[in-house]
Image: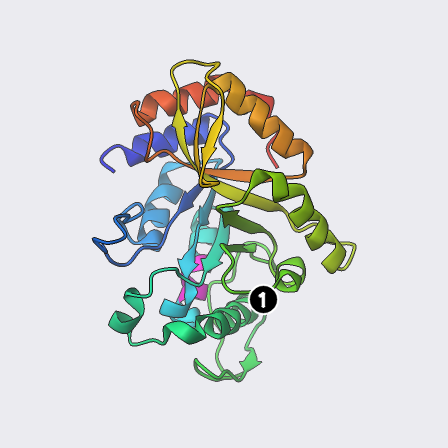
Amino acid sequence: MDDHLELAQMADEGRISALWIRDVPFYDPKFGDVGQVYDPFVDLGFLAAATKNITLGTAGIVSPLRNPILTAKQAASVDRLSQGRFILGMSSGDRPVEYPAFGYDFDNRAERFREAWEMIRTLNENEFPKMATQYHGQLAGNIDLVPKPVSSHLPMITIGRARQDMSWFANQSDAWIWHGVDPRRSKDIIKEIEELGDGKTWHPFGYANFLDLSENPDEPARLHHNIFLRAGRNTLMEFWKQQEQDGVAHITLNLKPTRRPAKEVLQELIEDVVPHFSLV
């Protein structure tokens, strides 16, 4: 993480479409992954001041472990400070060990996720809102959350399944980023979202990969467990072009497994891969 500011600025200047920040409160030795270590909203404030063009997003805020009122205010604040470059990605969390520490029930996280989603949306899109909740507080219409986002509609997307059904993704979430997806299923997933939606609104679908970029530009692309991807830049581009044709809108990359310096890999992606794809 010592050079994460430099990498972020490289991505900003290199036409990378988005920087995604994760929400990992604890180090769990059995899980072995602490994301980017820093608190997501503190880190986003830091990155908002140090970048100019790149979209900043969370992938994702573990909403059942956070107060939705504070999350709504933090999200709107980052959106303002970044001049409308923020996307609020939310998840239900996949680490049961964290829930007892917060005093929350792991089994009702799906319900808490939906309620937090609705409350954040209500607070950021309405003035002096009224809302009754089961797991959080009550809004009586006599107080208003400030600031509001730059736009009247702050983009909110789902990270992972969040224990929701497909109809929810098709009608509530502005977009969906999954992980562990068999790329051969992408087209069917996108078709199902379209069929379950209102027929008017586009709900983009994407997924996450851990990337190990080979020094050999023609090394065949190999996907392990539908998430760990090793390839050369040419085969990687071919693989992603096929996914683009299938309707995949976005792929998030984690360079943790790379055997080369992250700066070197990022520079190669910027110079030889990114120019072949459009920014949405």
Q: Is residue 170 part of the magenta span, yes or no? A: no
Q: Residue at x 57, y 73 (%)?
A: 127
Residue closest to the far right:
199
Q: Nearer the viewer, residue 206 or 46?
A: 206
Residue type marked 1: Glu
Q: Is residue 121 above or below residue 142?
A: above
The vertical placement of 99 against 217, above or below, is below
**For the stretch drawn in magenta, what is the main secondary structure?**
helix
Q: From what the image shows, is residue 153 above or below residue 102?
A: above
User: Which residue occupies the foreground of this view, 125 or 256?
Assistant: 256
The answer to whether residue 233 is left or right of residue 168 is left
Residue 160 visible within the image: yes
Left or right side of 264 for 230: right
Q: Quadrant of the C terminus?
A: top right
- Locate residue 189, reporting x and y percent: 65, 49
Task: Please state the extent of the stretch shown in magenta in the rendering.
Answer: 71-75
Residue 246 in percent (x, y) is at 68, 36
How many neighbours does mark 1 have within 10 angstroms: few (below 14), some (14-19), or many (20 or more)?
some
Quarter of the image where one finds residue 172 = bottom right
Residue 52 vertical position relative to residue 20 in the rendered view, above or below: above
Please state, as top left, top right, bottom left or bottom right, where the N terminus lies in the image.
Answer: top left
For mark 1, give the secondary structure. helix
Residue 53 is situated, as x and y percent measured from the top left of the image, at 49, 35
Residue visible at 57% across and 52% down in the picture: 176
Q: Which residue is mark 1?
A: 125
Q: Residue at x 46, y 25 (%)?
A: 14
Q: 258 left or right of 221?
A: left
**Camera sees residue 66:** no
Q: Residue at x 26, y 32 (%)?
A: 3
